[in-house]
Image (cartoon, coloured by chain):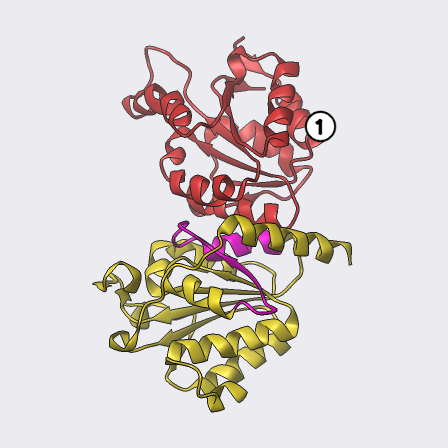
Chain colours: A red, B yellow
């Protein structure tokens, strides 16, 4: 799969699983998703990824399901926030993390994060799915199961959203 | 203010916390507290006040308030030390941009008290121009908080302390998980009103 329909992703997260609070730090690859979501709810842009996680935690305490979006490098900013808010309190959170397509032309800083992203998520016991190799129905089942288990979970955007 | 006549407070910090929590109780505010001594200390005061005491998540109390305020009109009081404030620097400014009823109280003693008294690397006194600054007058502080209660909006208050007079508290029993569960229940109740 070389691209993924953004409308399907929005339907899965906002429509089916009622993710209402969208907060994070923008990234080029996420622009189609953010453009689509902004027509439905007001997106909150955070000054840094850890603060986005904290704000999502506040929204969750107010009873609303949250999504934090960021590029892969942002994950490095928010490990403590993830563990000491959502993980400690046992509340679910959807992470949408953009990462580069594995190509030979990948810039070095993208390559660096691409190489460790999955390992970091595994080390944190955060289940993840990449949209390039996950069927649409499976993605919805994955999100629903993670929410039911009060888990932090990640959707990795590794191909173009159209 | 009755707290000024109460002999049971061991420190100025306790006396000021009592003032703030009395206000929180009177307006049913949610009090979000950064980690460290303040969180431990406020756990001992937690009587009829809704509190979220952060464990870890250093510097993130104001950001939690940003997300909470998006969906709940309940007044919010954020309390943290200057070490937290400096670490989470953009979150204080972020909270100030929100259309909510939030008072951000920062205790300034110039040190990371809980970790042994190391110097906080940024002097807030000269840098936080957007805040109201208080040096030892709890009467003026009470007036400022009362004004915030009446006028609404966001407000940031910096309270200067003498770090050599601070006796640290031990970690409270109970955890974020328990406090969160209670806060979450209260939030749901609030949303149904």
- The quadrant in which the C terminus of chain B is found is bottom right
Seen at 41% across and 20% down, the residue is A100
- The quadrant in which the N terminus of chain B is found is bottom right
For this rendering, which residue is in front, B42 or B130? B42
Image: A6 above or below B13: above
Residue B84 spot, x, y in % from top left: 36, 58
Residue at far bottom of view: B5
Residue B142 spot, x, y in % from top left: 51, 83
Bin the neighbour count of mark 1 within 10 Å (Cα to Cα): few under 14, some 14-19, many 20 and up: few
Asked if residue A17 shows in the view, the reply is yes
Seen at 61% across and 69% down, the residue is B48
Residue B89 spot, x, y in % from top left: 38, 56
Q: Secondary structure at mark 1?
A: helix
Which quarter of the figure has residue A94? Answer: top right
Which subunit holds the residue at mark 1? A
Query: Can residue B47 be found in the magenta stretch?
Result: yes
Side of A66 where B158 appears, left or right: left
Side of A62 where B58 appears, left or right: left
For this rendering, which residue is in front, B130 or A132? A132
To which residue does mark 1 refer? A16
Residue at far front of view: B173
Magenta-tinted stretch: B46-69
Seen at 52% across and 13% down, the residue is A132
Side of B115 where B72 appears, left or right: right
Query: Can residue B44 be found in the magenta stretch?
Result: no
For this rendering, which residue is in front, B88 or A85? A85
Which quarter of the figure has residue B150? Answer: bottom right
């Amino acid at each position: 799969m070389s691209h993924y329909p953004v409308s399907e992703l929005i339907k899965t997260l906002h429509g089916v699983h009622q993710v209402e609070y969208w907060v994070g730090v923008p990234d080029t690859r996420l622009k189609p998703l953010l453009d689509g979501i902004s027509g439905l709810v007001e997106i909150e842009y955070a000054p840094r990824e850890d603060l986005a996680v904290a704000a999502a935690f506040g929204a969750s305490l107010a009873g609303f399901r949250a999504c934090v979006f960021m590029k892969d490098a942002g994950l490095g900013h928010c490990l403590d926030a993830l563990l000491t808010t959502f993980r400690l309190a046992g509340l679910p959170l959807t992470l949408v993390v953009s990462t580069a397509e594995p190509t030979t032309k990948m810039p070095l800083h993208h390559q660096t994060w691409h190489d460790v992203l999955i390992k970091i998520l595994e080390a944190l016991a955060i289940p993840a799915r990449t949209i390039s190799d996950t069927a649409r129905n499976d993605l919805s089942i994955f999100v629903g199961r993670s929410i039911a288990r009060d888990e932090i979970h990640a959707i990795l955007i590794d191909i173009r959203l159209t | 203010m009755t707290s000024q006549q109460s002999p049971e407070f061991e420190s100025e910090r306790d006396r000021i916390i009592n003032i703030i929590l009395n206000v929180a109780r009177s307006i049913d505010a949610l009090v979000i507290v950064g980690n460290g001594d303040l969180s431990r200390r406020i756990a001992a005061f937690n009587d009829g006040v809704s509190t979220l005491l952060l464990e870890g998540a250093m510097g993130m109390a104001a950001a939690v308030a940003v997300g909470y305020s998006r969906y709940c009109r309940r007044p919010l009081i954020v309390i943290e030390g200057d070490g937290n404030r400096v670490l989470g620097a953009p979150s204080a400014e972020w909270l100030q941009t929100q259309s909510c009823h939030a008072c951000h109280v920062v205790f300034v003693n110039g040190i990371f008290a809980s970790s042994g008294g190391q110097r906080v690397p940024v002097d807030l006194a000269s840098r936080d121009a957007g805040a109201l600054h208080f040096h030892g007058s709890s009467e003026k502080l009470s007036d400022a908080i009362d004004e915030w209660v009446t006028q609404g909006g966001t407000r940031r208050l910096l309270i200067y302390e003498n770090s050599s007079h601070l006796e640290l508290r031990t970690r409270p029993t109970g955890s974020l998980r328990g406090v969160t569960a209670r806060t979450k229940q209260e939030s749901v109740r609030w949303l149904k009103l």
